[in-house]
Amino acid sequence: MKIRSIWTLPAVGCMMLFMASCSGSSHTDEVIAEESIYDPGAPVSAVGFGEACGIRLFLQDENGGLSPLNDGDYVEPGSRRFAVETACDPLSIDRVLVSDGAAYQEEALPQDGRYTCEFAVSADDLYQVVLIQAVHPSGRASKEKIVLRTAPPLPAGSYAKNAVGILVAQELLDLQKQDLAALLDEKIQELFSSIRQNGPSFITDLRYGDSDPSTVDVVVHSIDAVRFDAEPSAVLRVRFTIRDVTLAALPMFGQDFLSTSANDLLVDAYLAVDDSGEGGEVRLVLDLLDSVSAAFSQPFFLRSSIEHMIASELRKIELPPLSFDSAGGGYDPAEFLPGQVEVFGSVVNVHELIEGFELDPGRRFFADVYSIPGATTHEMLALGLGLCSQTSEDVSWSFPDEVPPSESFDMEKVVCGLFEDAVNEVFEGIRQEYVGVVTSLAYGDGDPATDDVIIDSFILGNTDDPGVRTASVRFTVKQVDLEAATLFGVPIISTRDNDLAVDAVFFIEQRDDDTGRWMVLSPDSRTDPVVSFGTWFLGRELVEELVRQDLKEMASRPYGIDELLAGFGLGLDPGSVFTSEPYALFPDVSPFFQDPGCILALPDTFSVSLAVSQNAINRLLEDIAGAQAERDVYELIKKLLGEDFPGFRREPSAGEQTVMRLSVPPAVDVRDSRIRLSIPDIVFQYRTSGGPQWEASVDVCLTVTPAAYWNRLDIDLSCVSGKNRFHVMRDNPGNLGIFDHSSLAEDVLGGLPRLLGGSPGSAFLSLGLDSWEPSLVFEDRDEPVLISAGGGYLFVDMAVGGIDILQ
C-alpha cells in the first residue's frame, strides 16, 4: 500500500469505520434504556436535524449577568456558573445535562427561563469540552458542544515576542565563515555597483576583487559570539577583508584628489541583532554599535579619513522583517521539510503532501528576530524570535523609494578656498610687517558671488610619505589694489585692479592628533615661488619680492578635514541592496512577553538548542487550521491514503457526501514533561442529496513521544485515557445511539497501525535525520536529538556537525 500523507487524522479513520457501519441505514425507533441515559458517560441518542432545538451557553457572573460562550472563548478554570438557553418548549425537555463529554456531569436546573448549574472548569487540558444534552421525554436529546480555552490567550492586537529562543554553539558559527563570505561578496558587489551607477559624481571609481565572478573576493576571518563589557548589547564580533579595493574620488582639475588601488580593506565590528527600525517599526536590524574599525592594508593620502568615513557610515544595517506566505513568497518553510518520511513503516512523499494540502494563500507569517545578550557567552550565541501572522489583504507593503539626486561636492572650490586663505594670510602678513609703509593692500571686486582667486593650473604629485602630496599650483589673485610709501600724502607705489600671478609648489599633508584630523597646507621651501603682476607700476619688482618671500615663509596652515569635506561621503547603505524590491511590513501589533519566559541552556555535547513556546505553536496552528473550511472526507481520504487503500470506494455513491470541520484549532500542551496534542470537537456530517442525515463529534487527545536513535527520529502517539470521545450529535435515521459516548474513537486510534497497513512495532512517524543534509548535518551518535517539554516550552537539543544558518 502507498500512503500519501503523514497527517492521517485519527478522526478520519474513525469516520471510515463509522460510515461503513451507518451510511444508508434504515430508520429505527430503538433508544438506549431510559434508566441509563442520565448517568455520566452514558450513551444518549440524538434527535434528527429537523427535531433539534437550538442551544446556547452563557457564563453567569455573581450579579446574574450573562456572557455568551462560543467555541474558542476563554474561561478561567475553577467552579463557574453556566446558564443554558434553549429554543425548545420547556414541556419538551425532561432534563438538561452539562458534561465534559466523559465521566464528569452536572444537571442544569430551571431558573428564570434558563437552566443553570455549577460546572468545574478543569485546568488539566488547554481545552474544556462542554457537552450540553437537552433530553426530551422520548429519551433522545438535542445536543450542542462548546469547546472553551482554559489558558488565557495573548492580548488582542499583540504577539508573543519571546516565542522562540535559540542557542548556537561557537563551533557552528566557525563553520559559517565561507557562507558568510559568499553572502558578503554578493551584497558588497551590489552595493558598490549601486554607488557607481547612482552615487555622487565625486566618486569616480569604486570596485574590488579580481573581476572574476567565479571567485569570492571577501575573506571572513572570524564570527565570534561575545559578551563584551564595553558594548553590553553586543553578541557577535565579525572580522572580514574585502580584497583589492580600488577607490578614486574628489575629482579636481582633471585628476583625483584621493585614490588607491588593489588595497585590502579589513573590517572589524561588534554587532547586536535588533528589531527596531528607524521609524520604530519591526525590522531585522544589524546594529554595529558605533564599533566598526576599517583599516586599509596599504597607506594612501587621506587614508585615515576614508577609514573613519567608512566606520561612521556603517552604523546600522536595516533589513526587511523575515516573512513568508503560504503561497511560497518570501522564506518558504517547505524547503526545510524532509523529502520523505515513514508512517507505520510505509513511505510518504512529503512534498506531494504539501502540494495537496497547501496552506491558505491568504496568510503571511512574520518573524521578529533579536539577540539576547544576557544569554550569549563566548561559547554560544543566543537569539529570540517573536512570531505572528496576518491575512494577505491586511498586509502593508514597502516599495523602494526613487533614488534622490546626488548631492554635489566641488573639490575645486574647496582647493580654491585653501589658496584664497593662503593669499589672505600673506597679504595680512605684509600689512602687519610694513605698518606705516603699506597703507592699503586688497584684492577682488568686493562681490562674494565671484571668485577672487582663480586656479589656472593644479598638478598633484607624490612624495615618499603617502600622507603628504605636492601641489604645483599656478593661480591668479584678481584685481589687486596697493598703495605704499606715501610722500606728502601721495603714494609712491600704487596700482589698482592689477592681477597677480603666482606659480608655487606646496605640500598638502594629512595629520591626525588627539584634537582631530587635519589637512595642512605649507609652502615647499626648497623651491622659489614665481610672482608677477600683470601690469607694470613703480616698485613692482619690490612688491613681487615681498609677496614671494612671505609666500615662501608662510606658516603651515591646518584645516579641519571634517569641515573641509563636509558633504562628501561614500554613501555606504548596505540595507539598500536588501530593499530594492517591495517587501511586506511587520503587522502593527504590540509585543507581549510571556511570563514565565524560557530558560535557555545548551546541554554538554550539543550545539543547537531551541525553546519553542506553547503559545507560539498553538498560534501557528490557529493561523493555519483556523482558516480552513469544511472538507469533503472522500477527497481528504483520497489525498491522505491514496486510491489504492484497501476497501476504499473509488467513487462515493450518487448524492452521498461526508464532510468534516474543526470547531477549534489543534492545541499542543507542553506545560509539564508530557507533549500532548488535543483536537476536540472534530465534526463529521453525512449528507444525501445535499441534506444532512447525521452528525458526529470526535474529541482526540494524544501523547506525543519523540525519540532519536542514531540517524532516525521516531515519533509515537498514544491515547490519553478517557480523553478520546465519540458523540452522536444529530441522527435522522435514529439508529446511531449505541455509538454515543462509546470507545470507538479510542479503539480506532489504537488500531491505526493495522488500519493503515503498517508494520508491527513501527513508529507512527519515522524520518531520517539525514533528510536535511547538507543544510543540516547531525552528528553520528546514539542520541543526536533530545526533545523534551516543560514550563510551556518545547525544547529541542541537537548535536549538529554542520549547519547553513545563512540559507
Image (cartoon, rainbow, N blue to C red):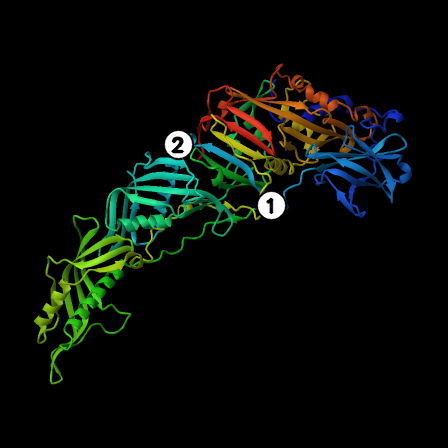
Residue type (three-letter) at the residue carrying disc 1: Ser
Q: Please tell me which residue is depicted at 18% across the width and 68% down the height of the picture.
A: 477
Q: Please tell me which residue is depicted at 67% across the width and 22% down the height of the picture.
A: 650
Residue extending furthest right?
91
* Residue pointed to by mark 1: 158
SS assignment at label 1: strand
Q: Quadrant of residue 615?
A: top right
The numbered mark, 1 or 2, whose residue comes first in the sequence reads 1
Q: Quadrant of residue 644?
A: top right
SS assignment at label 2: helix
Residue toward you, 645 or 650: 645
Residue toward you, 264 or 78: 78
Q: Quadrant of residue 12?
A: top right
Above or below, comparing residue 46 to residue 262 in the picture: above
- Residue 603 position, x and y percent, is 50, 28
Residue extending furthest top?
760
